[in-house]
Image: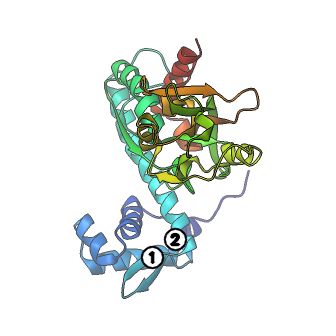
Amino acid sequence: MEPTEPMADRETTELAPRELRVLVAVAETGGFSAAAGRLGLTQSAVSHSVRGSETRLGVVLFDRGRSGARPTPAGERAVAHARRILRMYEALAAEARAAAAGGPPGGDGPVAGVLRIAAFRSAALHLLPPVLTRLTARHPGLRPEVRVVRELRAGTAGEVAEGRADLGIATLGGSAEVPAGLLSGVLAEEPYALVHPAGHPDPRALPLLDWDENCGSYTRAWWREQDWIPTATVKAEDDGMVLTMVERGLGMAIMPALSLAVAGDRVGVTDLGPGRPTRSVGYVTSREQAARPAVKALVRELRAERDRLRG
């Protein structure tokens, strides 16, 4: 017989859902009073709950100060786990009800409840709409929620790691690695192209337009080898703004295929040749979310859309 952990030890480290909700609320609101207002509790109840959680875990979770409460490194990790655990509680309830109602025929199980997706702008605009249209038609009990997240620093993968999203549409293999413990899969390899005003006789002579999310290793290593590419003279908020500026003749840009889905007749697209840079677009999810029928169904639809675009 395998040794078991004493019940007393387990009781000192386990946190109840209410305690997890308090940790998340304090982290997201930045203080005990604000968290109390969000949860409908008194400030003393929130403070008591946090102290109890810290005692059970044996670590300080928040730095208290006049400006509020900020998670310590241990607190950031605890809050991320708390969000992910609470999401699984929500999924448990939704999927159990769907199973009791019969669920859909076949598949991996009942597909129902909220499905939280983080995606960078062009993926949210051009990749997800047909995917979610098919997904919700097949599974009416599913309620997708999409949040646009800039692919800077932790990006969409960070949203999954922090428990704010069940799945993220991310750029993979660039300068930011997928956080440890998460699962990922490639959906498409996107080529970059030279984008310029249609009909321009010498587009390479135009000023360079760029945006912050285009600063990954996908393009920069290649750019350094190109003596014809100048330093960007205009930085825009996102790829949509860059495309609009190109359309109005303000310059040229180096852009990935997904960003060009709505390029009009006034935009010219020139292949950069066999050495052109590419980026990998894929999905990121946690191990526990990957087992959910809703996430499995979404991944299937994403792969089907990938195959449709290839064909």
At label 1, the amino acid type is Arg
- Residue at image position (50%, 78%) is 55
The image position of residue 206, as x and y in percent, is 56, 41
**Farthest residue toward the top?**
311
**Farthest residue toward the bottom?**
66
Quadrant, the C terminus: top right
Image: 35 above or below 226: below
Seen in the image, is 298 located left or right of residue 254?
left
Mark identifier at residue 70: 1
- Residue at image position (34%, 27%) is 100
Disc nearer the start of the sequence (1/2): 1
The image position of residue 27, as x and y in percent, is 41, 68
How dense is the environment of label 1, judged by Cα within 10 Å: few (below 14), some, or many (20 and up)?
some
The image position of residue 280, as x and y in percent, is 64, 35
Separation of marks 1 and 2 at Cα, in angstroms: 8 Å
At label 2, the amino acid type is Gly
Q: Between residue 20 and residue 162, name the one nearer to us.
A: 162
- Residue at image position (34%, 69%) is 29
Image: 55 above or below 231: below
- Residue at image position (36%, 88%) is 66
For disc 2, the marked residue is 75
Q: Between residue 212 and residue 72, name the one nearer to us.
A: 212
Q: Is residue 237 visible?
A: yes
Q: Are marks 1 and 2 in contact (CB under 8 Å)?
A: yes
